[in-house]
Image (tube, rainbow, N blue to C red):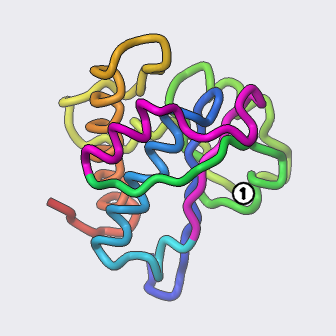
Amino acid sequence: MSSDTSIKVAFVCLGNICRSPMAEAVFRKIVNENKLADTVTYIDSFGTAGYHVGDRSDSRTIKTCKNHDVPINHRGQQIKSKHFTEFDYILCMDDSNLYNLKRLKPKNSTAVVGMFGEWKDSDSFDTVIDDPYYGGTDGFETCYQQCVSFSKAFLKKELGVNIP
C-alpha cells in the first residue's frame, strides 16, 4: 500500500456494546501508538442489530479496556448500507454476523467484508471472537487478547507494518 493511500476500518458484532467497540478501541490505540493515523484515517464500530443503539459499551468491556490502558468512548450504532462504501474493511466477530453482513451488503459495496480473525497470523486464538455478554470477565479478557493479536496481524498484512 502506498503512503498516500488511507484506509477506513469498521468492526461489527451483534449489538455493538461488547466485542466491536473493544476491537475499535484496541485497534485505534495500536494505530495511534505506532503513528499510523495518517494511513488508517477512520475507525468505527457497529452492530448488525439495533438492540443497543445509543447505549454505552458494556461495563465489562469498559473495565477490560481500562485495565489495559485502552481509551474507550463509544455509543452503540447499527451498520447501514452506506457504510459498505464508506469503509474499506468491515470486519466482524463471528459467522452469524458475517452471514448478516453478507445479507445486508449492497451491490455497490466496495468494502472487504470478512471476519476479523481471518487476519490472524498464528494458531494462538480461534478465528471467532465469541460473544462474552452472557459469561464472566474471562470472556472479555479473551476478547481483548484476540483484538490485540488480530489488530497487529491485520496491520502487518495490510500495511506491511510489523508491530511487536
Check the image and name the residue furthest to the left.
Answer: 164
Is 157 or 20 nearer to us in this picture?
20
In the rendered structure, does residue 15 fall within the stretch colored magenta? no
Tell me the residue at 31%/24% (across/down): 126
In the figure, is residue 106 to the left or right of 10? Answer: right
Question: Compared to 83, does 15 lie above or below?
Answer: above
Quadrant in the picture for residue 162: bottom left
Count the numbered circles shown. 1
Tell me which corner region of the image, top left, top right, bottom left or bottom right, holds residue 80.
top right
For residue 89, side relative to residue 81 (left or right): left
Query: Where in the figure is residue 92, as x and y percent of width and height?
Result: 55, 36
Q: Where residue 150 appears, x then y in whole percent?
A: 33, 45
Image location (x, y in percent) of residue 131: 47, 20
Q: Is residue 78 above or below residue 35?
A: above
Q: Quadrant of the N terminus?
A: bottom left
Residue ranking furthest to the bottom: 4
Side of 66 where 13 appears, left or right: right
Which residue corresponds to the image point at 37% horizontal and 67% vertical from the top-left? 31
Which sits in the foreground, 66 or 125?
66
Q: Give the residue type at disc 1.
A: Thr
Q: Quadrant of residue 116?
A: top left
Q: Is residue 32 above or below residue 85?
A: below
Q: Residue at x 20, y 30 (%)?
A: 123
Q: Which residues are magenta?
A: 42-68
Q: Position of residue 108 (x, y in %)?
A: 84, 53
* Residue plotted at (14% across, 59% down): 164
Q: Residues within 10 Å of mark 1 (few under 14, many from 20)?
A: some
Give the secondary structure at mark 1: loop
The residue to which callout 1 is attached is: 110
Vertical placement of residue 129 versus 147, above or below: above
